[in-house]
Image (tube, coloured by chain):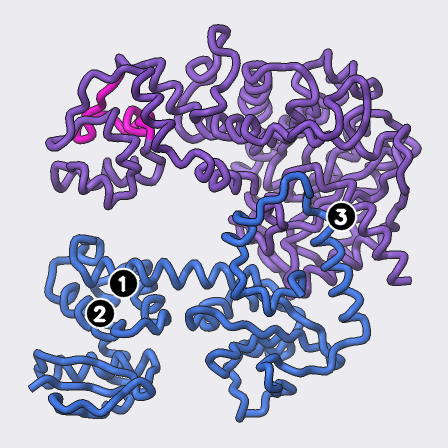
Chain colours: A purple, B blue
């Protein structure tokens, strides 16, 4: 029996691994009445794979049998691979037993689409329901919403899951039609919009009625495959930006396409994974969500593609040299945030510390500012940059930079 | 002459020493744990016995000055077991008790800065242990894990595991420090156990790994977990350096997936 389960786990974990989301944060679920588990709000990465990605959840497909034939997907109908399927009880048993051994924070369950979307979604919901009700499991549950399933099922899923997600898959409707002919933009957007409305409505209700049911407390996320289709970064980020704004998504994940299949519509196997581009997209995502940039400042029709050799914040600074140098002791927090080499926590510390004394470069270094970069963009009593010429400085920074290493160190943003 | 105060290595013991320093108005002192004590020619050596009441008075005095967060930093930096941490904590105490409130955030003061830095290190190790503990189920249903944390973090993680695994009895054993924390599901509380107290089936063999009789399906789940762990890595994205930064080799010994 164990051998068969192991074989299935191999197949179904392998098929799920290209979904990059593994976050177990955003939900605080206490362990009620001596059940199993809790979620603490911040999430825990229990291990890291050899590619450096965090392992927080048991991420598997319920089955990789699929009716659809999406070109970029290993589990597509026309791909000749081993197929397998777990029963509801098998998934529940593995989840509970992994959890009890402190291997994982919870379950991330997705599935190929068998029979029809409702039938598939119903099985996913049943796993979550069994875990929550029969086993009183309070760990993290992330369920995939199957495009095209009924709203009743989505509603029920949200009652048991911490997070729901439906993947936007590709950055344009045209590519979606081209590469995922059975999926439509509408079938993806509809569940997102439905969930967003429900979550907002329940949040309003909660202000008046205390005991409203827990409803997807960690919200929704989505993923876009980049590099499988010809869209530029502006198109990718425009979609992401509108998803954040319109549907209040917690996270948009960008997944550099890993060529696993031969298909004339796709980059050939062996084509390198666009990892640097993926990293730049995440950096842009961070600029939008945490650094108070608006999208058109970072990407616009004149600059539709992100620089690969320098990060988007630095490129923005080069395009807007008239806004520098910034006086660290006087400038507004928002402007300090925009200085290359200054992160959020050092920006906050600067604003705190300058109330007590006038800060110079030495102070900034102790506060954690990357001065080798920042010194070109700020003035302090001991630092006054001469006229910055973008092209010269760019060359200089590229020469002394540890780009190769910063690149890998920033890869852990995936968690 | 310098006074060398020797204490038993417990937190209460250290607080008692601090009490005595104030009580006897000692100026030039150094505090040392008894297991690290070496006879010293130019110091007057005194052994201080832990006294719960004296310790409580010092702790209350500190808490009047410190907010919860700073008290935590104080305790956590003690758990670092770093050489001379006692002297730093004494200097810290002297400084915050004499300075106006808020002084514990003056990072320009060396003791304040050191306490903060040590506390951060210990906190990071605590978080690591919450992630890296790997339980094995024994025949009698107890879940047992062995760890060797860099710092003495078991007291800090007990609450997390108690909340999370409220319905299973578990034991986390620190092999470096030869003690463990045991949660008894029926009693609903966590207690400290040492090897001598014979609690309950932990005996260490020469590799130092707790030898236990594991449950019938324990091996099967371990294999499943290893299978899962190996399967989900994407070969073309391999990044060994990043992997090692997140999971340093010194932790591998007790990580099921790295066996």
Q: Nearer the viewer, residue B58 or B201?
A: B201
Q: Position of residue A346 (x, y in %)?
A: 30, 39
**Where B246 falls versus B249 (above or below)?**
above
Q: Is residue A159 left or right of residue A23?
A: right
Q: Tell me the subunit letter for badge 1.
A: B
Same subunit, tags 3 and 1: no
Q: Quadrant for the C terminus of chain A, please.
A: top right
Q: Tell me the subunit letter for badge 2.
A: B
**Where A313 falls versus A365 (above or below)?**
above
Instruction: List the residue tagged with mark 1.
Output: B115
Q: For numbered disc 1, what is the local secondary structure?
A: helix
Task: Give the CA distance from mark 3 to mark 1.
Answer: 45 Å
Q: Nearer the viewer, residue A280 or A106?
A: A280
Q: Is residue B121 left or right of residue B131?
A: left
Q: Which is more foreground, mark 3 or mark 2? A: 2
Q: For numbered disc 3, what is the local secondary structure?
A: helix
Task: Give the CA distance from mark 1 to mark 2.
Answer: 7 Å
Q: Residue A189: in sight, yes or no? A: yes
Tell me whether the residue at label 1 lies in contact with that at label 2, contact meaning CB atoms closer than 8 angstroms. Answer: yes
Range drawn in magenta: A323-340
Q: Position of residue A2 (x, y in %)?
A: 87, 62
Number of other residues with Cα within 10 Å of mark 1, as a class: few under 14, some 14 to 19, many 20 or more: many
Mark 1 or mark 2: name the one nearer the start of the chain: 2
Instruction: List the residue tagged with mark 2.
Output: B88
Same subunit, tags 3 and 2: no
Rendered residue at 22%/66% (across/down): B64
Q: Is residue B92 left or right of residue B120?
A: left
**How many marks are shown on the rendered structure?**
3
Q: Quadrant of residue B74?
A: bottom left
| Numbered circle sitting on residue B235 | none
| Numbered circle sitting on residue A128 | 3
Rendered residue at 81%/22% (across/down): A263
């Amino acid at each position: 029996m164990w051998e068969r389960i192991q074989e299935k786990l191999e197949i179904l974990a392998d098929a799920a691994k290209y979904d990059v989301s593994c976050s177990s944060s955003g939900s605080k679920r206490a362990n009620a009445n001596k059940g199993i588990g809790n979620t603490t709000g911040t999430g825990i990465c229990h291990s890291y794979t050899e590619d450096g990605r965090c392992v927080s959840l048991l991420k598997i497909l319920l089955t990789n049998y699929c009716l659809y034939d999406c070109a970029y997907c290993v589990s597509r109908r026309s791909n000749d691979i081993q197929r397998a399927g777990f029963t509801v009880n098998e998934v529940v048993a593995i989840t509970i037993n992994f959890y009890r051994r402190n291997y994982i924070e919870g379950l991330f369950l997705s599935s190929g689409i068998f029979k029809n979307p409702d039938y598939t979604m119903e099985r996913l919901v049943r796993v979550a329901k069994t875990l929550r009700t029969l086993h009183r499991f309070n760990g993290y549950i992330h369920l995939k919403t199957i495009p095209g399933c009924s709203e009743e099922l989505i509603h029920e899923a949200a009652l048991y899951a911490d997070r729901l997600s439906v993947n936007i898959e590709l950055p344009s409707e045209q590519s979606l039609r081209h590469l995922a002919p059975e999926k439509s933009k509408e079938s993806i957007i509809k569940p997102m919009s439905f969930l967003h409305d429900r979550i907002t409505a329940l949040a309003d209700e909660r202000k008046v009625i205390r005991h409203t049911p827990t409803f997807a407390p960690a919200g929704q996320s989505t993923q876009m495959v980049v590099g499988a289709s010809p869209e530029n970064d502006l198109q990718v980020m425009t979609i992401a930006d509108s998803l954040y704004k319109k549907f209040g998504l917690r996270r948009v994940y960008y997944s550099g396409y890993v060529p696993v299949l031969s298909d004339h519509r796709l980059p050939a196997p062996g084509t390198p994974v666009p990892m640097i581009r993926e990293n730049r997209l995440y950096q842009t995502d961070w600029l939008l969500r945490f650094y108070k940039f608006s999208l058109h400042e970072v990407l616009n029709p004149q600059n539709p593609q992100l620089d690969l050799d320098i990060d988007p914040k630095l490129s923005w600074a080069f395009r807007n040299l008239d806004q520098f140098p910034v006086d660290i002791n006087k400038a507004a927090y928002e402007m300090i945030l925009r200085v290359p080499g200054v992160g959020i926590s050092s920006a906050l510390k600067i604003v705190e510390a300058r109330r007590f004394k006038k800060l110079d470069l030495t102070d900034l270094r102790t506060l954690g500012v990357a001065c080798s970069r920042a010194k070109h963009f700020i003035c302090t009593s001991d630092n006054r940059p001469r006229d910055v010429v973008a092209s010269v400085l760019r060359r200089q920074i590229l020469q002394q930079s540890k780009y190769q290493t910063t690149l890998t160190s920033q890869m852990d943003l995936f968690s | 002459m310098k006074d060398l105060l020797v204490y038993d290595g417990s937190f209460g013991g250290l607080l008692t020493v601090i009490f005595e320093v104030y009580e006897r108005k000692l100026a030039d002192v150094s505090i040392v744990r008894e297991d690290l004590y070496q006879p010293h020619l130019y110091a007057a050596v005194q052994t201080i016995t832990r006294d719960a009441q004296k310790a409580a008075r010092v702790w209350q005095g500190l808490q009047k000055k410190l907010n919860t967060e700073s008290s935590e930093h104080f305790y956590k930096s003690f758990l670092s077991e770093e050489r001379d941490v006692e002297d730093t904590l004494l200097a810290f105490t002297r400084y915050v008790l004499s300075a106006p409130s808020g002084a514990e955030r003056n990072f320009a003061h060396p003791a304040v800065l050191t306490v903060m830095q040590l506390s951060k290190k210990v906190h990071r190790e605590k978080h690591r242990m919450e992630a890296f503990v790997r339980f094995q189920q024994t025949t009698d249903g107890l879940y047992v894990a062995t760890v060797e944390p860099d710092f003495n973090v078991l007291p800090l993680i007990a609450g997390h595991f108690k909340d999370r695994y409220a319905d299973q009895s578990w034991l986390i054993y620190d092999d470096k420090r030869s003690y463990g924390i045991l949660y008894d599901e029926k009693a609903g509380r966590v207690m400290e156990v040492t090897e001598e107290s014979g609690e309950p089936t932990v005996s260490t063999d020469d590799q130092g790994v707790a030898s236990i009789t594991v449950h019938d399906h324990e091996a099967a789940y371990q294999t499943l977990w290893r299978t899962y762990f190996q399967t989900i890595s994407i070969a073309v994205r391999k990044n060994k350096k990043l992997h090692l930064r997140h999971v340093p080799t010194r932790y591998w010994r007790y990580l099921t997936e790295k066996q």
